[in-house]
Image (cartoon, rainbow, N blue to C red):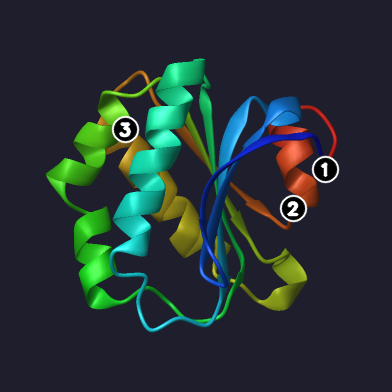
């Protein structure tokens, strides 16, 4: 994968990069957390601003390394109109959620319901998909994994 820029970094929690091969902003959640708190909105805002400044169409949400689920506060913000408005006002039109590979026992159906539901809430210009494991990113978006 060809990383063009690191857009945002909260060490050990979240990294946001621009992946040239995928034409994507890649937000990667790392290890265990006690809620991302201020890091989640800051990371999303930085990533979406970068996407708009560089006309990037794809948003890759990578939770392969995330151990715990989101805090209630993070989930509330992620389900807010403010969150959706940030996406609507950006150049992002395709959201790809990357979860652990199927053999890990990850709930792909639940994750697919979340991402397709989000895409529907955002409007007809948006698509959403889920892949199990990082190898699936290149299959969805092209380029190298």
Location of residue 4 with respect to 57 vertically, above or below: below
> Where's residue 78, x and y in %?
27, 55
Q: Quadrant of residue 126?
A: top left
Q: Which residue is drawn at 77% across and 35% down?
A: 139
What label sits on residue 134 in the rendered view? 2
Name the secondary structure under disc 1: loop
Q: Where is residue 136 in the image (x, y as percent from the top left)?
A: 75, 46
Instruction: Give whichever of discs 3 and 2 has the lower sequence position.
Output: 3
Report the residue marked by disc 1: 145
107 versus 55 height, above or below? below
Q: Residue 87 carries which label?
A: 3
What is the x, y in percent for residue 11? 55, 68
Residue toward you, 80 or 107: 80
Disc 3/disc 2 C-alpha distance (Å):
23 Å
Residue 96 is labelled as: none
Nearer to me, 5 or 97: 5
| Label 1 – label 2 distance at C-alpha | 7 Å
Q: Can residue 105 be seen in this view?
A: yes
């Amino acid at each position: 994968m060809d990383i063009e820029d690191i857009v945002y970094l909260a060490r050990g929690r979240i990294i946001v990069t621009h992946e040239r091969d995928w034409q994507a902003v890649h937000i990667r959640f790392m290890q265990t957390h006690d809620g991302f708190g201020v890091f989640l909105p800051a990371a999303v805002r930085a990533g979406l601003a970068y996407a708009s400044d560089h006309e990037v169409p794809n948003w890759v949400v990578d939770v392969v390394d995330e151990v715990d689920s989101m805090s209630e506060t993070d989930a509330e913000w992620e389900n807010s109109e403010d969150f959706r408005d940030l996406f609507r006002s950006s150049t992002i039109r395709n959201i790809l959620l990357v979860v652990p590979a199927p053999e890990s026992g990850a709930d792909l159906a639940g994750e697919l319901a979340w991402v397709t539901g989000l895409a529907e809430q955002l409007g007809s210009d948006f698509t959403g998909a889920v892949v199990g494991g990082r190898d699936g990113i290149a299959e969805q978006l092209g380029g190298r994994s």
